[in-house]
Image (cartoon, rainbow, N blue to C red):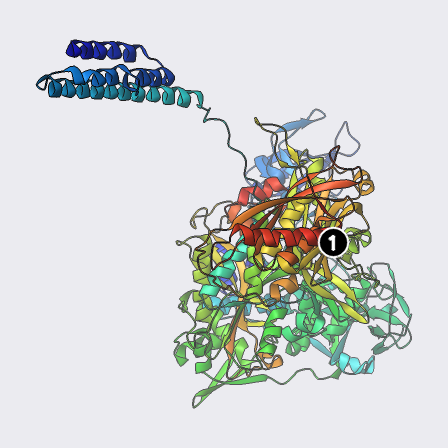
Amino acid sequence: MLKEKLLELREKALENVKSADDLKKLQDIRVNFLGKKGPITEVLKGMGKLTKEERPVIGQLANDVRNAIGTLIEEKRAEIEARLLERKLESEKIDVTLPGRKVQTGSHHLLASVIREVEDLFIGLGFSVAEGPEVEEDYYNFEALNLPKDHPARDMQDSFYITEDILMRTHTSPMQARTLEAHKGKGPVKIICPGKVYRRDNDDATHSHQFMQIEGLCVDKNIRLSDLKGVLTVFAKHMFGAEREIRLRPSFFPFTEPSVEMDISCFRCGGHGCSVCKGTGWIEILGAGMVHPNVLRMSGFDPSVYTGFAFGMGPERIAMLKYGIEDIRHFYTDDIRFLKQFDRA
Amino acid sequence: MLVSYKWLKDYVDLDGVTPEELADQITNAGIEVEHLSYPGEGLKGIVIGKVLTCEPHPDSDHLHVCQVDLGSETVQIVCGAPNVAAGQKVPVATNGARIAGNVKIRRSKFRGVESNGMLCALSELGVDKALAPYEDGIYVFDDDVRVGQDALPYLNLDDAILDLDILVSSAHCMNMIGVAHEVAAILNRPVHIPVPDPHETDEYAAEKVSVTVGAGEKVPYYGARLIEGIRIAPSPRWMQLRLIAAGVRPISNVVDISNYVMLEYGQPLHTFDFGTFGSDRVLVRFAGQNETMKTLDGQERKLTIEDIVITNGKEAVAVAGVMGGESSEITGSTGKVLLESAVFDPISIRKTAARLQMRTDASSRYEKGIDRNRVTQASDRAAELLTKYAYARVLKGIVEQGERTVPETVITLPWQKINRVLGADLSLDVIRGILTRLGFKVDKKGETIRVTVPARRFDVSIPEDLVEEVGRIYGYDHIPATLPEGEAIKASLTQYQELTRRTELLMESAGLTQAYTYSLTTDEHAAAYAVHPSSEKPVKVLSPMSEEHAVLRQSIVPQLIDVVSYHLNRQMPDTALYEIGKVFIPKAGSPRPEEEEHLAGAIAGSRSERNWEGEALPVDFFTVKGIVEKVFDSLSLSDRIDYLPAKRAGLHPGQTADILFDGKVIGYLGALHPAVQKEADLNETFVFEIAIEPLLRGEQAPIIYHGQPRFPSTTRDIALVVKRSVQAADLYKVIKENGEPLLQSVNLFDIYEGSHVAEDEKSMAFSLTYFDPERTLTDDEVSAIHEKILEACEKECGAELRG
C-alpha cells in the first residue's frame, strides 16, 4: 500500500518538476513534496502500522524517493538558473564597437622631445645639464668667447641689446664661459646646455628671432679632436640611425680652434644624393671645435694643461631634418594639429 | 669670392682636376665652395663671325641686313643692335644654336628679309646685364680672333666659377693669389706668382707729389705712385672677361686695372685723377666732425672724427679704404693718375663702412685684413698693367709714409702638441710637409718646432692655428674617433630638471599640450597677467625687429591666450595648453631683469567631448583647479597651499583665486574677464600661472614609509547647514584641525541650496574617514571625534547638523 503510494508520489513529483518553469514553482514543489507537512512525511508517520519486516524496506524506499525528488528538483533548479543567467547575459549585451570614453591627454612639444633625447644621451656619456640666463652680459656672450668688441665676427650675430652691456643671448655658448669660471680652473668639465637664444632676424620659413640651441662642452687634461669626433659619432648614430657616418669639415668660429662643421651621411638616401642632402650625400648638422686657448684662459683654465671641445646644435634644425618640417615658425605657432603629430617623438 | 677656374690656372697647374673635384677639395680643406657654376652652360653653336657688309633694312628704321662670314660659309643675318657695323668680329648664334635661357635660334624672316642666325650681345649669352661692358648692342671682339672658331672660349664661357664663402679665418683667400696658394697646398703642386715690373721712368715722383699721414697708427702705411701720359680706353678683352667672372663690371683701362689688381693681390688700390686732385700734396687725416664730401656714387657723405679721409691738403677727396670722391674721379679725359696703395686699420674701415652703409670690395678686404707685405707688389703690378694697357709713364719711386713690410710671425711649439690636440699620430715629416706646402717655414729644435708664418696668412698667430692647418690639410677623415679618457664624473639631471620633466608629464597626462611661445612680446602684453605685477618699467630691447617682439614678457598667460585664439579662429574651440618657461621681472636699479621659470596654462572649450552618451562638459574653474592641485600634490606640498578669492586685472572678479604657498602669493587661477573674452572674441577661457621654480628647487619632503595598514578605516558622513557666505575652505580647516590625529581624509560630496534650507543658507555634506594604524577604531571612539568636529563647526562657522 505504502509502497505504491511512494512510487506514485515519485511519479507525480517527477511530472510536477518537469513542468515547473521558474524557481518559485520549483520551491513550491519542494515544499509540497518534501516539506514537514508533505506526503512523504505523512508516509513515514504511517510507518508504525507496518510489520517489523516491512518497516526498513518502506523506510529505505521513502528515503530513496525523497532523495530522488530532491535531486530532480536540484537538477531542474540548475537548469532554470542557467537559463535565467543566459537570458540576463543576453539582455546585458552591448555594442562593443562603440567608441570608448576618451581619456584626454596632451602632447609633448617636439622641441622638448629632441632636447630630452639629446640630454639623456649626453648624461649617459657623463655630461651634466647646465642652465643659464637668457638675458646675458656682453662679456659672457661675446668677450669671454674670444669675440672682443671690434671683432668682425660679431657681424655674424646681430643681437637684441637691452643696454650697451646687456643683451638677449645670441647663443648658448656663454654657458661655456660661465661654467668654466665656476669650476675655478679645475677640470673635468662636461656639460650640455639647452636653451632659448635670440637673434635680430625677421621671422620666415628658415629664420626665427627666437630659437633653441644645445651647447656641449668637455674640458679636461688630454681632450683631443678625435674625442670630439667619437662623441659626435655616437650622437649622430643615436639621433639619426646606426648606419650614419659623420664627416668633419674645417670651419671658423671665434671660440674654437680648430673649428669644424659636422655633416652626417644623408639618412634619406644613405649618401647617394637626394633632395634632402641637395645631391651631396651629406647634411650639415652642427658646428664644433677645440676650445680656443683664449676662452680657457679668460675663464681661469690653463690652456697648457687643459684642452677641450665644444659644440653647438639647433634642435629645430635637427627636428626639421628628421621629419621634413618645412617652416621653423611651426614650432612657435603651437598648432595642436602640428604638435600632436609628434606625440611619440 | 668668385674664383674663375681658368684664371686660377695662371698660377697653379690644374691638369686632371675638374672644377667639381677642385670645389670638393677646397670645401674639405676648410673654405666652403657654396656654389659651382658654369657660365656657358646650355650654350651651343656660337661661333666667331665677321660682319662683311651692313646695309639698312629696306622696311625698317633700325634693323640692318648683314652678310656675315662664318669661316665655312657666309650667311645673311638681320641685326637690330645699334652698334653693328661692317668689319666687326662678333659672336654669332648660328642656325640651330642655343643661347641663354635655352632659346633656340632658327632661320626666320624679319619684315620679309631672311635671317640665318643672330649676332649676340653678352647678355644674350648669359652674362649678367649689370656686368656687361657695353650696355647697348652686340659684343665686338678685338681684331685678333679667328673667324669661324667656337666663340665660347674667347668669351670665357667655357669657364667654371667657384663661389667661396670667405669667413674671418679665410680672408687670405679673398684674392686670386691667396686662392692659388691654398689650392697649390691642397693639391700639393707648385704655385707660380709672376713678379711684376713697374717699368719706371727716370723722373722722380717725389719731386711732383708729397705724402703726409696724420692719422697715426690707423694708417700704418700709405704709398702713392704718380703716373702720367694716360690715355683712357677700354681694358683688354681678357681683363674684362676676368672682371666679369669675378662679378666686377668693366669700365675703363685705369679703373679696371685697379680692380683687377685688387682681385689678384687682395690689395685695394685707388686711382685719383691727378689733374683734378686740387694740389700736389696728399694728406691723410681724420675727418672733421660734420665734414662732408661727395663720393663716386654721387652721394653727399657726412663724416665723423672717426673716419679716415684722403685729402689734397684742404678738402677730402676719398673716404679711406671705402670709396673715392667724385671730384677726382677717373674720366675719359684723365691724363695723370695718382695710384694709392695703402694699409688702413681694419676696425676703422669697418666702422666707417657700416655707418655710411657703403660695403665696397675695398672695404670688405680692409675689414678682414690684407697681406701687409703685398702693398708695394700690388702697386708695381698696377703700374706694369697701366704701362701696357693705358699708355702710362710711371714716375720713379713710390711716395710713401710708414713701413712697407711687417716682421714675420714666428710660432714655437712642441711638435707633438699637434698630435696631442688632434688625437693623431703624425710623423714630424708629415707635419713639416703639410706646413711647407702651405708656405710656412719649419725649423726643428729638439722637440720643438719654430714655424715662420707667411705674411699673407695673417689669420695664423698661435700654435692652435697650426694644429688646424695640419688637421685640415691632413684631413679630419683620417683622424680616428675616440671617446674622452680620464676620470669619470657623476652625471644626472638635477632635482630641478627632474621635477620639471615630471611636471611636464603631469600636465600632459592631465590633457594639456606643451607650447613654446616667444619671450619677446608687445608693450601691451609684457606686464599683463603677471603673478606679481611690478611697478618697474618692462624690459625692452633697444632695436626690435617689430613691435610684436619688443618687450620681455612677465607672464606666459597672454601668449597662451593668443594660442587659444589662434585655434578658435581655425574652428578648434577645445584647447588645453601649458608652458614652462622664463618670465623676466624688471628689477629696480638693474638693467637685467630677474629670470624665473613659471608654469602657465590656458584651457577653453569642453573637458569631455560630446559623444553617444551625451553632451560635452564645458571646462570650468574646478577643472583647472583640479589640475593645479595635482601639481602641488605631486610635490607633496598641498598642505602648505591655500586658495584665496582674488581680484586681478583681466580676470573674472568672482572666479579668480590667488594661490598661496606658506601664506605668500605664488600664482593664480581664474576665468578670463567676460569683457576681455568679448574683446578678443574668445569663448570662456580659464588660465593659471604659478611661479614654480622655487618649489621645484626647494627641499623635497622625504618619502617616509608607514607600513602597510593592517586595520580598516571607518567612514562617516556629516551634513552641515551654514550661511552661504561660509567658504568650503573654512569648514575644511575646522574639520581637519579638530579631527587630528585620527581623521585621515575629508571629502565634500554634496552642496545643496534650495527649498529645504533657508534662503541664505546652504548644506554641505562631508564624508570623513578615520583611521588608526594601531587598531580598529570602535564606534564610540569615532563618535567622540565626530561629535567634537561637529561642535567646532557649530562654534566657529555657525554650522548646524542638517536634520
Which residue sits furthest front? A49
- Name the residue nearer the viewer: B500 or B64: B500
Q: Split into 4 quadrants, where in the image is the N terminus of chain B?
A: bottom right
**Would residue B155 be found to the left or right of residue B550 on screen?**
left
Which residue sits furthest left? A53
Q: Find residue B772 and report its horizontal and vertical position in percent.
A: 51, 57
- Name the residue nearer the viewer: B537 or A91: A91
Chain to which mark 1 belongs:
B
Residue drawn 72% across and 36% down? B569
Image quadrant in which you'd find residue B618: top right
Q: Find residue A298 and report its horizontal and vertical position in percent.
A: 62, 80
Image quadrant in which you'd find residue A335: top right
Q: Find residue B231 and report its horizontal and vertical position in percent.
A: 77, 63
- Name the residue nearer the viewer: A3 or A144: A3
Instruction: Specify whether residue A262 is in view.
Output: yes
Residue drawn 67% across and 44% down? B622
Q: Split into 4 quadrants, where in the image is the C terminus of chain B?
A: top right
Indicate whether A177 appears above or below A158.
below
**Would residue A138 be found to the left or right of residue B502 on screen?**
right
Q: Find residue B516 and report its horizontal and vertical position in percent.
A: 64, 51
Indicate whether B625 appears above or below B216.
above
**Element at badge 1?**
helix
- Inspect the image, locate mark 1, and give the three-letter code of the amino acid beneath it: Lys
The residue pinned by badge 1 equals B795
Which residue sits furthest bottom? B446
